Amino acid sequence: FFSRGMFHKAYAFDIDDNLLHTNCTVFVEKWDGSKMQRCEIPESELKAKLAEGRTYPNNDPEECYYNMRLGWGKLTQDLFDALDAKAYGPSWERFKLANLQASPIGIITARGHPIEDLRSAHQALLHEAFTLEEREQFLERMKLRLGEHRASSDRLIRDFFDMNYYAACANRAYSESLKIPFETSSAKKKVLAFHKFIEHIVNLNQEKLMNPYRKTLKIWFSDDSLENLSAIKEAVQNRFVLRYPEITFALYNTNNPKFVEKTLYASKQNQDPEF
């Protein structure tokens, strides 16, 4: 498995409308003639409703995104509701492939759930959304990665999730961990989170068990938000390629699910025939 191909890959994914088309909702308020009335709307309609004059509840964005910050398995429930509806996003198959290959994965979402909920939701997907045959394939890949063919399934699964990276950009504790104001834009937070993921992969790469054949690194990022993608593209072009000349970056624009746009970025010394 590891002897094929030119690259050792790591993947970072946005969740909503990228992995799965979730039915996430937010709260806004409108004046009904006598008082402010709170209503729940699809998150995808928020910008339009704010432009029409609706406001955040009590002028507080945190109250608006209440459903997208809940713990207690709310994210897992949203994901499984989408799976039940077969509402697969444009990056779902690549996400499955990344898991089956036991590649390092980053989940970088604009949501604000507790970080441990992102990890537990990912674990639930591996256990429930993959077939028994697919889970066995994943375990075999992890054995190859670790070079420990007698490792228990529990050990392999634990090591895999320890290898991954989870970022909830609207989580206050995560903003504090980045040492930035909570009010920082989601796009800027995603750039910082992606940089943390890159650093995480570079650190993992120092261990031969993660990349035993010392292949060139390729790090992928996929998102459906044009604002996020623009910020990531600027950072990759002007900073990350220069700082990490040994890494090839691949950005996937899934804003139009019917036409996913892939763009590669690399230093001149690291360019390959794909360019």
Image (cartoon, rainbow, N blue to C red):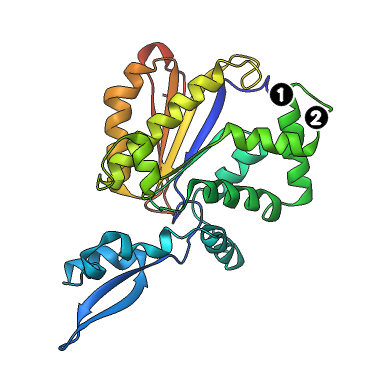
Instruction: Tell me the tag on residue 151.
Output: 2
Q: Amino acid at mark 2?
A: Ala
Q: Say which residue label 1 marks.
A: 146
The spot of residue 184 in percent (x, y) is: 25, 44
Whether the residues at callouts 1 and 2 have beta carbons within 8 Å, the answer is yes
Residue at 39% x, 44% y: name it: 173
Q: Nearer the viewer, residue 79 or 222?
A: 79
Q: Nearer the viewer, residue 189 or 98?
A: 189
**253 lies left or right of 88:** left
- Give the mark nearer the N terminus: 1 vs 2: 1
The spot of residue 71 in percent (x, y) is: 50, 58
**76 lies left or right of 56:** right
**Mark 1 burial class by Cα count in 10 Å: few <14, some 14-19, many 20+:** some
Q: Quadrant of the C terminus?
A: top left
Q: Residue furthest bottom?
A: 34
**36 lies left or right of 236:** left
Kind of element beneath mark 2:
loop
Residue at 75% x, 28% y: name it: 143
Q: Quadrant of residue 179?
A: top left
Q: Quadrant of residue 52?
A: bottom left
Q: Quadrant of residue 64?
A: bottom left
Residue 99 visible in the displayed image: yes
Vertical placement of 81 versus 258: above or below? below
